Amino acid sequence: WVSDPPQVITKVSVKPTIHNVFILDTSTSMEGSKFDNAKKALLEQIDTLRKETDVNYTFSVLQFSNADKVEFIMQKTQSSGIPIFKEPNGWTALNDAIGYAVNTFIKDDAVGSDQVVFKIFTDGEENSSRKFSKQDIGILLSEIQKDRSWVVTFIGTKSDVKEATKIYSIDASNTLVHNNTGADISRAISYDTTSTVNYSKRIIQGDTS
């Protein structure tokens, strides 16, 4: 979403707050270099964004595998602190992870009119959710993008990205494909870092194009 950032509806005249929410797949298939590179790139992203002086960022990281292992390891942290990652294990409760993350911010009155960017990362398809179906998530993501102007991006394999654009109501311009290797996962998250900085600049400048 560097070349085609999300639409911003309201011109911002004060220093904006952007909640950066990373939804990270840590199922068993992420073990090894994929998980190591994802952690490293995500920590680098947090460090980079913290250096930005024109935006108030908060950082949230939700790790997920099985349906009973969906949890925030960092939530709305600002100037200090880093996520303490847990090792990969289990299946892929992608729908439940997205639903839990989004509903947490919907219910948070302190978020108010702040911008929220949900960044979904996975290396494999949904196979473990209990609370949310794909259709549930499609409706939920469509509503927050339309009614709240929140942003949803998706990083995944080619088949996962195809599914996300079809069912999850995520625009293709907000997706990025990785080839399921550690090195390419690092590239994808680094690309996302640049995208986030560009998106923030457009908000600051009031660019809604």
Image (cartoon, grey):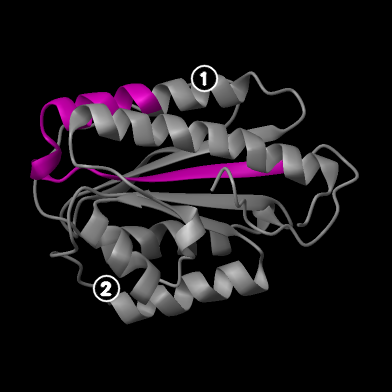
Front-most of residues 99 and 177: 177
CA separation, marks 2 and 1?
A: 34 Å
Graded by Cα atoms within 10 Å as few (under 14), some (14 to 19) or many (20 or more), the crowding at tag 1 reads some
Residue 21 locus on image (x, y percent): 48, 45
Q: Residue at x 32, y 28 (%)?
A: 186
Residue 71 locus on image (x, y percent): 31, 47
Q: Is residue 32 left or right of residue 207?
A: left
- Element class at badge 2: loop
The magenta-colored residue range is 16-41
Whether residues under marks 2 and 1 lie with C-beta atoms below 8 angstroms apart, the answer is: no
Front-most of residues 142 and 100: 142
Residue 90 shows in this picture: yes
Graded by Cα atoms within 10 Å as few (under 14), some (14 to 19) or many (20 or more), the crowding at tag 2 reads few
**In this rendering, the label closer to the viewer, 2 or 1:** 1
Does residue 61 belong to the magenta stretch?
no
Q: Is residue 152 left or right of residue 184?
A: right
Residue 131: which numbered mark, if any? 2
Q: Residue at x 73, y 33 (%)?
A: 55
- Element class at badge 1: helix
**Amino acid type shown at disc 1:** Asp
Front-most of residues 87 and 127: 127
Residue 47: which numbered mark, if any? 1
Q: Is residue 72 above or below residue 53?
A: below
Q: Residue at x 20, y 29 (%)?
A: 182
